[in-house]
């Protein structure tokens, strides 16, 4: 089972995934890191973990379709089984989606379908909900929609600030994303046999 992680920023989720692969908790090969932002810190993490890394953005292409065609070609060349989005800040278009049906997974920092979009943590905090959390789901053509694989919740306490809530959400992500990926890769592998 070969995994590619797509990330655009800090890459703390990439970090825990790389650690879980190295520890044998996720029984898969971390074949590729793809990053669309040449300044992202995740690139340092990729180098540290010695993961083959590719970096380019839609700006380097005539349009998004051409960008995704190139990405799809690379994924197929590397025989990638599963694409794991970890803070990848772009919407996946039909080119990639059609090539990897049910094989692109995302993590979102709210309890979907509440608070989709770019600011899931802040939107939940500002709304004043008393419980929020994380959602791990397959990608479909919508924004933060698609079949839900797992969710985990945390209360928002009166003493919480946006910063403390962000910290709690990241802790949930770092705990659950590797575990869920371990389950999925195991299941997809046994389905193939
Ligand atoms: C995470 O909160 C994830 O839920 C969201 O983007 C953030 C990425 O964080 N999709 P990091 O780059 O993995 O540290």
Image (cartoon, rainbow, N blue to C red):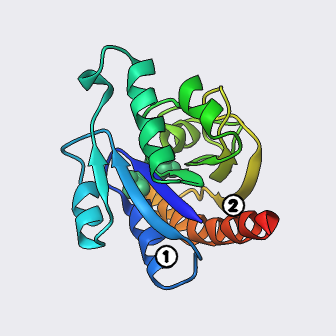
> Where does residue 1 sit, x and y in percent of width and height?
60, 66
Q: Is mark 2 within 8 Å of ligand 1?
A: no
Q: Residues within 10 Å of mark 1 (few under 14, many from 20)?
A: some
- Name the mark nearer the viewer: 1 or 2: 1
Do we see residue 169 in this rendering?
A: no
Give the answer, above or below, for where 31 lies relative to 91. below
Q: In this rendering, would 171 be left or right of 46?
A: right
Label 1, label 2: how far apart the Cα atoms are: 22 Å
Q: In this rendering, would 116 be left or right of 89?
A: right
Q: Looking at the image, which residue is at 61% across and 35% down?
A: 99
Give the answer, above or below, for where 120 lies relative to 10. above
Residue 35 position by quadrant: top left
> Where does residue 125 sit, x and y in percent of width and height?
54, 43
> Where does residue 88 sit, x and y in percent of width and height?
43, 42
Return the residue nearer the eye: 7 or 50.
50
Tell me the number on the disc at residue 152: 2
Tell me the number on the disc at residue 21: 1
Residue furthest out toward the left: 39
Do we see residue 3 in this rendering?
A: yes
Determine the secondary structure under disc 1.
helix
Determine the secondary structure under disc 2.
strand
Q: Looking at the image, which residue is at 66% across and 66% down?
A: 185
Q: Earlier in the sequence, mark 1 or mark 2?
A: 1
Residue 58 position by quadrant: top left
Residue furthest out toward the top: 62
Residue furthest out toward the bottom: 23
């Amino acid at each position: 089972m070969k995994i590619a992680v797509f990330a655009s920023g800090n890459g703390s989720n990439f970090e825990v995934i790389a650690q879980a692969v190295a520890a044998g908790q996720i029984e898969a090969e971390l074949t590729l890191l793809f990053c669309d932002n040449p300044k992202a810190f995740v690139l340092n993490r990729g180098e540290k973990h010695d993961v083959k890394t590719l970096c380019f953005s839609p700006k380097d292409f005539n349009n998004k379709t051409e960008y995704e065609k190139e990405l799809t070609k690379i994924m197929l060349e590397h025989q990638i089984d599963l694409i794991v989005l970890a803070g990848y800040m772009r919407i996946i278009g039909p080119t990639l989606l059609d090539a990897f049906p049910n094989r692109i997974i995302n993590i979102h920092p709210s309890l979907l379908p509440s608070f989709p979009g770019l600011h899931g943590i802040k939107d939940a905090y500002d709304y004043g909900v008393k419980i929020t959390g994380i959602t791990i789901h397959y990608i479909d053509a919508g924004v933060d929609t698609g079949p839900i694989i797992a969710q985990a919740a945390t209360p928002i306490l009166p003493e919480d600030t946006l910063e403390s809530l962000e910290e709690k959400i990241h802790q949930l992500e770092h705990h659950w994303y590797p575990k869920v990926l371990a389950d999925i890769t195991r299941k997809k592998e046994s389905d193939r046999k």
